[in-house]
Image (cartoon, grey):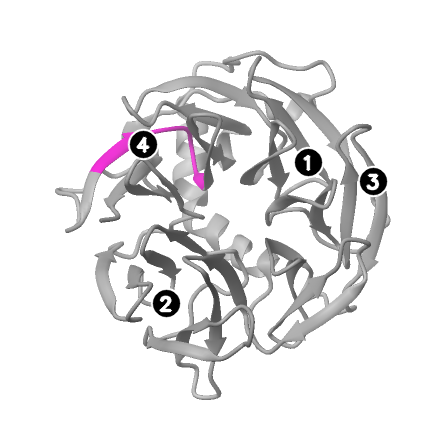
Amino acid sequence: MRRSHQARYAALVAATTFTLVMGACSSAGHSSAGSHDSSQPPNSTIVPPSPGLLASPMPSLPKGVTKAIPVGLGPNGATFAFGSVWVADHHDGSVSRVDPKTGKTIATIPAGAGPGYVSPGFGSIWVTDYFENAISRINPKTNKSVHINLGDNHGPGNTGCSAIAAFGSVWVGDGFDVLRVDPAMDKVVGATKVGHDPNALPCVIQQGGGLVWTHGPGNKIYGLDSKGRLAKVLPFVNITFGNGKEWVEQETPDLAGRVIALDPRTGKRLSVTSIAYPGDGVNDNMITSPGRVWIKNVTTSTLYGIDATTGRIVTKVDMNGLLAGMPAFAYGSVWLPIFDQNVLWTVDAS
């Protein structure tokens, strides 16, 4: 059975615990960058990075990587919105706002205890959290954040996956539930239970085809309608939308991984691409760009670029065993957070 989102995160933390302890010991104190909303938890104080202790520089960038842009500690999820690239700096308790033209960080914004993923909607950036039953909302006009408590009655887990804006609400997995948050009140207004398996907690990934999609039990994805009612279950571990197609990730009985292009009207398979081993299906690791679909595969430590017309793999970026987060597309490049290097890689998406 595929590991839960929380199990994968535990392994990720174990891989970086020693360097984080050393970095914390080397810090002379704590400081905060950017504005801090009074409702933000006190444990989101930003620790200044110590690059020499926390990241071992690579001798050279892998083929296909054009830049390595420094950000905060433990960059995990990225998105592009409001003219900027936003990345959740997990170990800083912050979000870095990066100018995609210059690669410079223009704001560092407190965002919870352990930021996970970032996504836009309703004029804001929404940030999930690996440690809390909460999300943060960032105003891109002021670079200030608001902490939104989701309550603690939804079962085990946290909100480490994405928060998706759709149908007038922000949708986020929390415990056994997919919650709907009213952006006008910043309050939970609805919940849909998706199974009772602590090893397969809901993890909201995408909106598409008139539904909001989440991971769930049985290595399947679950589609919820605008009212939060279960409308469809598909035997895949991932889904994204783009280039006029639905893209799904399938894990076969022999543990091979396939990316399948589907006709969104008929469901007909248009292409099937083998990626050797299953990708990181417990996270939303597939994105699209013009003419391409991209999938980050943890098992092979590779970022694959697939031609959206032919289904052929046209780009392979070797991540050299490094931990990588959720990528984003902006300004002709894929922006890939490299967790244990504290950088964003830019990959030519042409």
Residue 341 forms part of the magenta stretch: no
Q: Are marks 2 and 4 in contact (CB under 8 Å)?
A: no
Q: Is residue 187 left or right of residue 200?
A: right
Mark 1 or 3: the one toward you: 3
Q: Are marks 1 and 4 in contact (CB under 8 Å)?
A: no
User: How far separated are the C-alphas under marks 3 and 2?
Assistant: 36 Å
Kindly report the distance in space between the C-alpha atoms of the residues bearing marks 2 and 1.
29 Å
Of the pair 174 and 290, the residue shown nearer to us: 290
Magenta part of the protein: which range? 67-76
Q: Main secondary structure of the magenta part?
A: strand
Instruction: Give the CA separation, mark 2 to mark 4.
Output: 26 Å
Measured in 3D between alpha carbons, the distance from the residue under mark 1 to the one under mark 4, in whole angstroms, is: 30 Å
Q: Which residue is mark 3?
A: 188
Q: Which residue is mark 1?
A: 135
Residue shown at 62% from the left, 40% from the top = 128
Mark 2 or mark 1, whichever is nearer to me: 1
Q: Marks 1 and 2: in contact by CB < 8 Å?
A: no
Q: Residues within 10 Å of mark 2 (few under 14, many from 20)?
A: few
Kind of residue sitting beneath label 3: Val
